[in-house]
Amino acid sequence: MGVEYIVLMLLGFMLIAALIAVEADDLLSSVIAIGAAGFALSVVFLLLGAPDLAITQVVVETIALVLLIRLVVTRHDTTSEMPRDALRTGLVLLAGGLLLAGAFFAISGIGGKGAIPPFGEPVLGHKATDAVPPGVSADYLANSAEETGAANAVMAVLLDYRAYDTLGEATIIFVSILGTYAVLRRFGRRKKSQETEP
Amino acid sequence: MGTAIYILAFAVLLIGLYAVVAKKNVIKIIVGLLVFDYAVNLLLVLVGYRSLGSEGWGKPPILAEGQTPAQLAATAVDPLPQAMVLTSIVIGLGLTALMVAMAIRIYERYGTFDTNQIRKLRG
Amino acid sequence: MSQGMTPIVKNTARLVSGFIAVFGIYIALTGHISPGGGFAGGVILAASVVLIVLAFGRETAERIITPSQCHLWDAAGAGLFLAVALVGYFAGGFFVNFITPISKGQVGKLFSGGTILVSNLFILIKVAAGLAGAFLALAAFRRAGLPDGHPKEVC
Amino acid sequence: MMFIVPLLVILPLGAAFCAVAMAEVSFLKRWTGSLATLAVLANLVLAVLLFGTGDLKLFVGGWGPANTLGIEMVCDGLSKLMAVTINLVSLVSFIFAGPYMRRFTKPWLFDAILLIMIGAMNGVVLAGDLFNLFVFLEVAAIASYALVAFGCEAEELEAAFKYLVLGTVGSAFILMGVTVLYSLTGQLNMAKVHMLLPKAGLGSPAVLLAAAALLSGLALKAAMVPFHAWLPDAHPSAPAPVSAMLSGVLIKASGVYAMARIVFNVLGPTPQYAAILMTLGAASMLIGVLLAVGQWDLKRLLAYHSISQMGYVVLVIGAAAQVAARPSPDMALAGLCLFGGLFHLLNHALFKSLLFLSSGSIEHQTGTRELKKMGGLARRMKVTSFCCRVGALSIAGVPPFNGFFSKLIIIVALVLTGHGVLAALAVFVAFVTLISFVKVQRYALEGPPAGLAAQACEAPALMCAAMVILAVLCVATGLAIVPLREHVFGPAADALLSAGRLVSMGGAP
């Protein structure tokens, strides 16, 4: 059985899990369903030749799940099911339909050249003489071991060729954690009497 | 087959979008954003996958013992989208922590996750 | 909740949290030769702190690492990663891999990849300390409940 | 001079890391604000120094230029203009924040987060790589979510959450667009993508999908009208220096600037993209100002005016794209359009941050933002009300001030490109803006002192100093229009129009 079928089945599972997560009445089941979708995604990553991503996705998913479960488990949900906002839902469905149709045209290549390359045939596989040459990744694969000394090409890209992006990534974690501290301060403003002290 | 995989990825993305716009609960909105994030990451990895036809699946872009870089370049999947997804996953984690903190404070201030009751601002 | 969970959970947590921490460090340090890397390793290392907070409660966890130590390690990790980028100026420019030209190492062995190994280490410190600190802050907030005087708008 | 370019990003980030470490040391804790101000001042000096050089292109890590393996940082005329604007407004905001933030707890957190936002915005305007652009957009966005929620009150948390949700959706769309472009070309470097896109088919569905995703994501960040819902909540909820930064530079750097870059330097201007930009711009211009007129909350009123004024910029950038997309483009006319747009962008950064800072000063002294509860402040707070008047006259487009010149150029450019109706609309919007600010003057500054304003006294000296700097600049930029066009806006417009100049190697790949 080809990898396509397994990926397709896992994506179907993800789709169902995401639907349950969005539509479940109980917030805890919703959060657990999103965890299931995340773990299915990590298996998809593993099958598609991305073990780095699979590891990261699993551990990130675990931490996110712990955070979300602790968030919902002690808090009482008082959401009353309101009659649906028909206009909003309709607009979303309309926009979503347009997006899906556009994506379908962009993927299936109706309208001649310029479609997203078919699944399994990325630009990387082009020949150097094609109209669109294979791009930077071919160079990464061929030269990363020689140029950076790292056997793992993903790490070579992440921490050497494109290390500047990784600085941004580290800053994102840094600033979101500072933001967490800022949001969790018990008092945002001082009382009048405390204002004089810096 | 390939088209079906892409369309499924876009369908997951749409579910996330639907939850963000139409749901009236802070947790549901967070869940929708997570689904949205998954779908975009998935799309990036799909774009970089290379199948080798009859010779099997695309290999991870990691140089194995005794393999030459030329062999790797002929069989491995694209490493650049993977580096991008790694960044994107980390962004997702940071956002999740921030969203959870905000949800805790919103619950503390309003006593509910219902966005119909969280409406001090006029929009 | 202040005493944590049952003894079974506590003993298991005591047993495995060390292994989890070591595994996180291993994942980070071998990131350039096998799957993993500093981010995954850092999150795993933070997960061991999360496990201790869940099993024993926040006070016990703060005996291992306090929130203010978390801040310091967090800033130090980020600053050291930036320093790696800045040292590159002496080798020709911003973010230049300055170790590879000196000693390349053997591809596939631990000491290879130049700054990649060093950067992974600093990212490990940064991510682990940051996430552990954020989780401690979230845990502290949860226990405290509402403050006695509900804050009033002062201005 | 090449070494300066990364420093613009590194200095604020490094200072932020230092500030967090300093906060744990008791005797250094109160100096984080000074450190931040110094870092931003150094940044401003470096950004001004860059004007002495030509276009700088730097491959980070030395991985270029042969096959663009690394990330390219591009510092052309437009990047320099944006970098100076960002660092100038940031410096003024930090000067203002010194006394203002004493009212909040843990001001070091504020300093660190705002420094990261400034560094990230510098990163955005210096990026020559699509994914790098996305990463720094995201850093700036996350920092701004945290800053909007900084006060921790119910409204602030709610506004921040709304902003976070919409901002994240926008970012995800941007990443989707980048993904599609990468799948078509195998490159992330903007110049290379621009070069390879015609081979993939410019009007093909995949490119249009990418363009739709990128433009809607960036329109969300720029708060263009169908996507504007978050801005009037988020900008007023933040502390005043942050409002000044968000309205003054963030929506420009991560919205309008990125949009212009993508349309001109990556996708290449076509009539369709021009039409989209002009529709977004005209709608924001009109609807923003109509929503603003009815507001009684001073900061909300200013926030709606931000939408409207950004509409002017996007409209005229769209007109420039339309001219540039013609078979035989009139580059002088397109340059005039861009000159008007970019000049208005700079002016808006100056007068809108001035107005937000003076509203913050009023709020700090009187404790209210409601126009009806103020009154008579002209006598009680002389400096603040003088600066507020300068800002109001600038935004309303009264002759000697900078807003007049940029609006005039925009209207002339619209007439010359053959959009008489849009020009008339722009005049109408300018008129409504004037009325709206007459209302502010009438209720806040003139008249008998109302309850809360009666005991108000002048704001601390540093806050006044910050406002006076901006007020002087508002007048100065209006008077120095000719040299500015020659040395600043001309190269900036060239950077957008000559997309080929971004190509570092030239020739076939």
Image: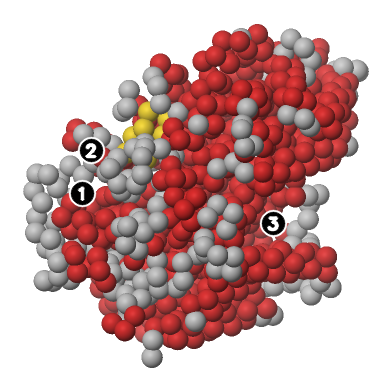
Q: Nearer the viewer, mark 3 or mark 1?
A: 1
Pinpoint residue C94: horizontal percent, then vertical percent: 28, 37
Q: Residue at x 78, y 26 (%)?
A: D415
Any part of residue B103 in sight: yes
Q: Residues within 10 Å of mark 2 (few under 14, many from 20)?
A: some
Query: In terms of secondary structure, where does tag 1 sit?
Result: helix
Query: In terms of secondary structure, where does tag 2 sit?
Result: helix
Do pointers 3 and 1 mark residues of a single chain? no
Residue ID for mark 3: B109
Do pointers 1 and 2 mark residues of a single chain? yes
A154 sits to left or right of A101: left
Relative to D241, is B49 above or below?
A: below
Pinpoint residue D143: horizontal percent, then vertical percent: 53, 44
Give, as a three-letter code, the residue at label 3.
Arg
Cα separation, mark 3 vs mark 1, equals 47 Å
Q: Nearer the viewer, mark 3 or mark 2?
A: 2
Residue ID for mark 1: C115
Q: Residue at x 52, y 26 (%)?
A: D494
Q: Nearer the viewer, residue D402 or D230?
A: D402
Q: Pointer 1 and pointer 2: residues touching (CB < 8 Å)? A: yes
Host chain of mark 2: C
Give, as a three-letter code, the residue at label 2.
Gly
Which of the marked residues, 1 or 2, is nearer the chain's N terminus? 2
Cα separation, mark 1 vs mark 2, equals 10 Å
Relative to A42, is D494 above or below?
A: above
Q: Residues within 10 Å of mark 1 (few under 14, many from 20)?
A: many
Query: In terms of secondary structure, where does tag 3 sit?
Result: helix
Residue ID for mark 2: C88
